[in-house]
Image (spheres, coloured by chain):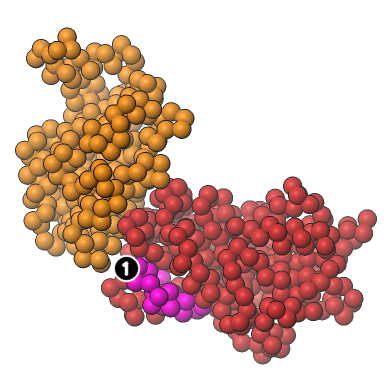
Chain colours: A red, B orange
């Protein structure tokens, strides 16, 4: 059953649930963060409207810097601003930032340990028709490997807004992963959000599904559907990939005895990798990682792509069944 | 320092010694005893590999004991092989991978202007790192925002690791290139103290443009067997070579007698 303390959207399982892209939540959050703190500045590489930095740019024109199509400069200029007291938010598509400018992020932001916020929008397959060049499927791995970096992947627009406000207050480098496509708003303003702390959204004890981004919604659908078959699933929204909420995940391994992870990312180096590293060394249980299996995306509508690449309720159900079988052996 | 470390760069630091001396003992607004002084000028060393001269100058300016210079590149040192901000108080940033210092300096200058700050930003960079696309992204942005609180100094010593710059990747006409991006350019003899100081003063008087001081320098300056030899870009001298080199530096290549003889 749904965890009542999560205060989720009461319409969560209705077909007409409200759909909003996570990037919109970032746009709203950034304006609020800028109102709270005059040191918040915004930099964009020629994608101001589509990364939803537009509202901030209009409201605070003197604190907005358009750097042109130059992602290396985008983050490195931001590192200089952060070194003298600003809290810079940089936005582009995730394939380009942090895709193209990884070394600058590593040296001038992470090693330098300054509070630059890397906003990677249009991540995952659900970019759709633009095709594989624009579908970031490696960004979590790139950012997770960096010391000092925090990695956040919100499940819906409200969570993206809360995450934006939260990272503005943290004096560390942060990566915030956003998506282009509309996704169901499964949380409410009252849903708890704390960086580094997962949220159990569905309570269960037979198996745990740990999901991130828009895959959390699909995991919840599976939990509800399998409840009818007397399978009790715990759904954990893992919005912070780093630092990982070791306590909650190990507790799930111990109490449920099997885990499925789901992410719109390569199966190497992302959420599944992080969970595997943790449980294999501390409390090994059967695990299935659902993600894109070491290949590139392609053009298509978001739902067609998620179907083709196996990021569906069906795929999650199959993984649940296989983990349950292993668990029983 | 370099003999003790057993690795590191010789030519670049010697070529920039005059400019560093001018900066830390005359030009920069700074206070080694008040590291968080808000009004201090911000210095970014983009080509971090010449940090031996940065460390030596900082030590002599009073940032840390001169004896600490011998810890360069050793385990546990604050004097990392390339400058690291959180390791050594007094450094404004972490740098080294070429082509990113000017972007950092541009960010500082943008923030300084936003805050209507009185401090200036000075970025030291090499000619070799003009090969990097990232450098030109910063050149364009600083020109766009007319950052008159930013002064960049290019160490135009004509060498990089693989050879002479004009053979590796022709850079000229550097003056025309920077001017085309809306920069004010001043060319100087990077070993002439008066020209160095005049150029920085001139840069403060330029409105609506960042300034590039194109400093023509001799790599390995002051040591006969190192001068203009690209082979000395990335290696330290042996103990014997260092003895000859230091003797030459102290005697102006044998022209004067000194108490060390």
Residue at left offset 25%, top offset 36%: B62
Residue underneath mark 1: A65
Q: Is residue B205 above or below residue B247?
A: below
Q: Is residue A206 left or right of residue B163?
A: right
Residue A90 in percent (x, y) is at 41, 65
* In the image, residue A47 lies in the stretch drawn in magenta: yes
Q: What are the residue bounds of the magenta stretch? A: A24-48
Q: Nearer the viewer, residue A268 or B33?
A: B33
For the N terminus of chain A, the image quarter is: bottom right
Judged from this view, the residue extending furthest toward the top is B261
How crowded pointer 1 is (Cα within 10 Å; few <14, some 14-19, many 20+) is rated as many
Q: Is residue A240 above or below residue A188?
A: above
Per the image, label 1 sits on a secondary structure element best described as strand
* In the image, residue A166 lies in the stretch drawn in magenta: no
Q: Is residue B116 left or right of residue A267?
A: left
Residue at left offset 52%, top offset 76%: A161
Residue A300 in percent (x, y) is at 61, 72
**Residue A199 appears in which quarter of the rendering?**
bottom right
**Residue B254 appears in which quarter of the rendering?**
top left
Q: Nearer the viewer, residue B161 or A74?
A: A74
Whether residue A231 is visible to the viewer of this picture, yes or no, is: yes
Judged from this view, the residue extending furthest toward the right is A329
Residue A116 in percent (x, y) is at 42, 60
């Amino acid at each position: 059953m749904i965890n009542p303390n999560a205060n989720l959207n009461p319409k969560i399982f209705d077909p007409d649930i409200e759909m909003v892209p996570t990037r919109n939540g970032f746009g709203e959050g950034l304006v609020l963060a800028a109102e709270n703190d005059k040191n918040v500045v915004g930099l964009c590489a020629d994608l101001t409207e589509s990364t939803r930095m537009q509202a901030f740019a209009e409201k605070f024109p003197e604190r907005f810097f358009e750097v042109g199509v130059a992602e290396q400069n985008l983050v490195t200029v931001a590192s200089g601003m952060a070194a003298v007291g600003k809290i810079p938010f940089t936005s582009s598509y995730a394939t380009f930032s942090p895709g193209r400018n990884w070394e600058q992020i590593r040296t001038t932001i992470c090693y330098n340990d300054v509070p630059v916020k890397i906003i990677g929008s249009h991540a995952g397959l659900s970019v759709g028709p633009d095709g594989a060049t624009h579908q970031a499927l490696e960004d979590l791995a790139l950012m997770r490997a960096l010391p000092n970096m925090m990695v956040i992947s919100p499940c819906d627009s409200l969570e993206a807004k809360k995450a934006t406000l939260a990272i503005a207050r943290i004096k560390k480098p942060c990566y915030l992963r956003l998506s282009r496509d509309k996704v169901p708003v499964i949380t409410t303003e009252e849903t708890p959000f704390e960086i580094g702390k997962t949220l159990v959204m569905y309570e269960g004890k037979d198996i745990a599904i740990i999901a991130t981004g828009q895959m959390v919604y699909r995991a919840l659908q599976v939990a509800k559907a399998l409840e009818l078959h007397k399978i009790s699933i715990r759904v954990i929204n893992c919005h912070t990939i780093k630092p990982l909420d070791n306590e909650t995940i190990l507790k799930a391994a111990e109490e449920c005895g099997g885990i499925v992870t789901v992410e719109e990312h390569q199966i190497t180096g992302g959420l599944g990798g992080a969970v595997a590293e943790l449980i294999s060394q501390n409390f090994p249980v059967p695990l299935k990682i659902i993600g894109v299996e070491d290949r590139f995306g392609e053009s298509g509508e978001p739902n067609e792509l998620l179907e083709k690449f196996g990021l569906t309720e069906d795929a999650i159900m199959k993984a649940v069944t296989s983990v349950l079988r292993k668990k029983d052996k | 320092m370099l003999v003790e470390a057993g690795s590191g760069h010789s030519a670049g630091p010697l070529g920039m010694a005059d400019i560093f001396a001018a900066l830390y003992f005359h030009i920069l607004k700074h206070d080694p005893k008040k590291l968080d002084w808000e009004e201090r000028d911000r210095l970014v060393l983009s080509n971090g590999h010449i940090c031996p001269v940065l460390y030596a100058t900082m030590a002599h300016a009073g940032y840390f004991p001169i004896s600490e210079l011998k810890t360069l590149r050793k385990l546990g040192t604050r004097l990392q092989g390339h400058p690291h901000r959180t390791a050594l108080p007094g450094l404004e940033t972490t740098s080294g991978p070429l082509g990113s210092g000017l972007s950092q300096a541009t960010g500082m200058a943008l923030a300084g202007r936003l805050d209507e700050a009185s401090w200036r930003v000075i970025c030291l960079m090499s000619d070799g790192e003009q090969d990097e696309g990232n450098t030109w992204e910063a050149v364009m942005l600083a020109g766009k925002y007319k950052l008159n609180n930013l002064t960049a100094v290019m160490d135009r010593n004509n060498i990089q690791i693989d050879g002479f710059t004009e053979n590796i990747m022709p850079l000229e006409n550097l003056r025309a290139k920077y001017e085309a991006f809306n920069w004010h350019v001043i060319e100087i003899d990077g070993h002439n103290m008066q020209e160095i100081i005049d150029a920085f003063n001139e840069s403060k008087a330029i409105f609506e443009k960042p300034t590039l001081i194109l400093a023509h320098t001799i790599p390995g300056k002051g040591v006969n067997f190192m001068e203009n030899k690209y082979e000395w870009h990335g290696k330290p001298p042996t103990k014997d070579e260092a003895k000859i080199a230091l003797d030459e530096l102290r005697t102006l290549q044998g022209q004067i007698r000194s108490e060390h003889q």
